[in-house]
Image (cartoon, rainbow, N blue to C red):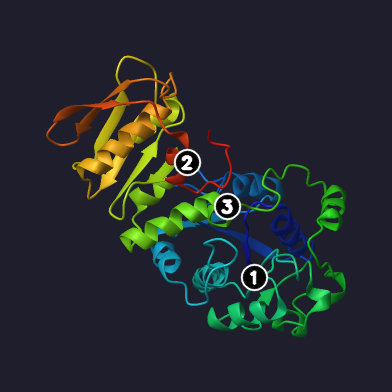
Amino acid sequence: MKAVGLLSGGLDSTIALQLMLDQGIEVFAFNLVTMFCCCTPKGSSCSSARTAVSQLGIDLKAVNATDEFLTIVEDPRHGYGSGMNPCLDCRIMMFRKAREYMEEIGASFVVTGEVLGQRPMSQRRDAMRLIDRESGLAGYVVRPLSAGLMEPTIPEKEGWLDREKLLAVSGRSRKPQMALAEGMGIRDYPCPAGGCLLTDPIFAQRLRDLLEHDGELRKEDVSILKLGRHFRLSARAKAVVGRDEHENHKLGNELRNGDHALEVSGEPGPLTLVRGGVGKDDLAIAATITARYGKSGGRGATTVLCRRVGDGAMVRIDVGPVDRERVRSKMIGSNSHADE
């Protein structure tokens, strides 16, 4: 008997797959990745998922679904969670792709590490039923950690699985799972609860601002949301300021024709990328922000060099002492002085 096991690399999914292996099920791990995964190197499966399959001794199929997922994030049918996380739509897509893989390899059902009541948006009874139904997997999703609290699935009814060996875990505490993992010899789970940037409050604010002003998501724009400090200059223009040499280098690689790159003249400081329909006033504000994060902190007169990418045009912008409150008022994705 074959099953497809949805594997994040976290504690719950690793235990769920081990429970299936213990019942003699041949498990094929499936890892869906996007550019919003916190622990996923670009273009590869989750590093934690790779660690998990090495412990479990099973195969892993990884699918990068970023392109499809961007359209979901733009306009999720079932709405967002506490941030910009479209958890229900994400799970439906994930389960649908798992079903396609199940059919491809001739497996009979799908296994997940979901725990009833652990996550408020996607791990409620009604949400689980909705996800199963809309993904085309109703009756064929086994949740071994909470199966004892739920209606029997087809694999249980048909005797493919022994229901008595499935668990009845619920709620947000992971203490029961940690104890189980210890008994199973599972000790290396570096990403216990998974991770999604869309649930991060600051990243969510940046993404919301991008959608409000650009109306669409492009991979190159989302990549920049992960870097630096972000500032809304006007309805058409924004600035991203590097926080260290590493981020300056990465922002430099993101520059494209039409962007402006600003740096403080004569002292260490950030690279500021300015993008959008940029006017003279936008560049003046961007220069002030750039001076603020230079070595002198913009406390006195500062000269900022502004280069337009594409034609190399360079202008000098002289900035007086910086009003820090004005700079802070332009920041996107911060509700504290942490970036000061």
Give the mark nearer the N terminus: 1 vs 3. 1
User: Looking at the picture, which amino acid does disc 1 mark?
Assistant: Met
Q: What percent of the width, then of the height, locates residue 158?
A: 74, 84
Label 2 sits on residue? 328
Q: Earlier in the sequence, mark 2 or mark 3?
A: 3
Residue 200 badge: 3
Label 2, label 3: how far apart the Cα atoms are: 20 Å
Q: Badge 1: how crowded within 10 Å, few (<14), some, or many (20+)? A: some
Q: Residue at x 50, y 69 (%)?
A: 97
Q: Amino acid at mark 2?
A: Arg
Secondary structure, mark 3, is loop
Dot 3 amino acid type:
Asp
Q: What whole-number distance in Å separates the C-alpha atoms at marks 1 and 2?
A: 33 Å
Examine the image and state in which quarter residue 331 appears: top left
Left or right: residue 11 versus residue 82 is right
On the image, the x and y values in percent for residue 236 come to 28, 53
Residue position for label 1? 121
Q: Horizontal placement of 260 versus 243: left or right?
A: left
Query: Are circles 1 and 3 on residues that touch, CB within 8 Å?
Result: no
Which element carries disc 2, helix, strand or loop?
helix
First of labels 1, 2 by sequence position: 1
